[in-house]
Amino acid sequence: MHPNPVFHDADAARNIAFARERGFGTLAVNAADAPLLSHVPFLLNAEGTVVELHLLRSNPIVRALRAPVQAKIAVQGPDSYISPDWYGVTDQVPTWNYVAVHLTGTLELRPQEELRDLLDRQSAAYEDRLLPKAPWKTAKMTPEVMDRMMRMIVPCRMAVSGVDGTWKLGQNKPDAVRRAAAEQVTGYGFGSETDILAALMQGAGKEA
């Protein structure tokens, strides 16, 4: 998270909505030698208090879950390099604009009998975005194959104790300067989802 408080102007509801919409992030837990990381799809409830996900049984994070552990999920949004030339004023320096939300909490394994319901709800949440395509459901799987695959994964839940978001969109610049840079991001920026980032920069400081 960027330390400048001007980039933390999004309220909890906006950060939670962003994380729920993305539904994918980097899970991190502490370990003896280095943090353990895993890139995971997840479900986040409307209140932003519970994350549900599943992991491969062979994932080192699962072995660390003999007891609940502190964990964090970093949810990355659009980003781009910002050239100082794009501001149209002097004495600027290069930077990188981005959106990211961190979910912090306590991660634990859940009983294996909860797995099928979790998988059904996860696939339903993602398949709904593909409508009018007929949704894929676990019931389409051959039972033996489904059972074999389910033995390879485990359900997990994280009780969320903290939500923090960085929306680094040039809020520390005058409106005209920030918007000038946003126009250049659309045509020349490189990173991910630069059109979305440019639109967010154009509206920075306004209610979302």
Image (cartoon, helix red, strand yellow):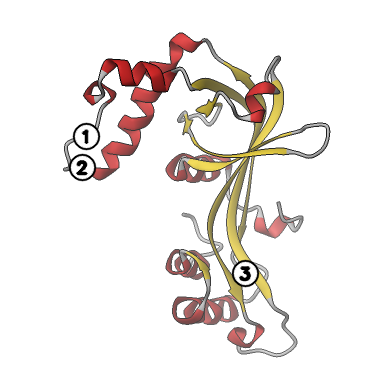
Instruction: Point out the frontmost of discs 2 and 3.
Output: 2
> Which tag is nearer the camera, tag 2 or tag 1?
1
Which one is in front, 121 or 85?
Answer: 121
First of labels 3, 1 by sequence position: 1
- Give the percent coordinates (x, y) of residue 145: 32, 21
On the question of residue 52 being in view, the answer is no
- Residue identified by numbered label 3: 170
Label 2, on which residue?
131
* Pointer 3 local density, CA inside 10 Å: few below 14, some 14–19, many at least 20: many
Q: Nearer the viewer, residue 202 or 197?
A: 197
Q: Secondary structure at mark 3?
A: loop
Alpha-carbon span between mark 2 and mark 1: 7 Å
Report whether 205 appears left or right of 21.
right
| For residue 100, side relative to residue 150 (left or right) | right
Vertical relation: 48 (above or below) 93: above
Is residue 108 in view? yes
Image spot of residue 207 (x, y percent): 49, 55
Near mark 1 (Cα within 10 A), the count class, few <14, some 14-19 or many ≥20, is some
Query: Are the two marked residues, 2 and 3, in contact with CB atoms closer than 8 angstroms?
Result: no
Q: Label 1 is placed on what type of residue?
A: Pro
User: Secondary structure under badge 2?
Assistant: loop
Q: Which mark is residue 120?
A: none
Q: Which residue is mark 1?
A: 135
Instruction: Residue 152: give x, y in percent of width and height.
Output: 48, 22
Say which residue appears at 50% left-offset and 29% top-offset.
Answer: 47
Q: Amino acid at mark 3?
A: Gly
Instruction: Label 1, secondary structure: give it.
Output: loop
Are discs 2 and 1 less than 8 Å apart at CB? Answer: yes
Q: Label 3 vs label 1: CA separation?
A: 40 Å
**Residue 181 location (% of width, % of height):** 55, 79
Which one is in front, 11 or 187?
187
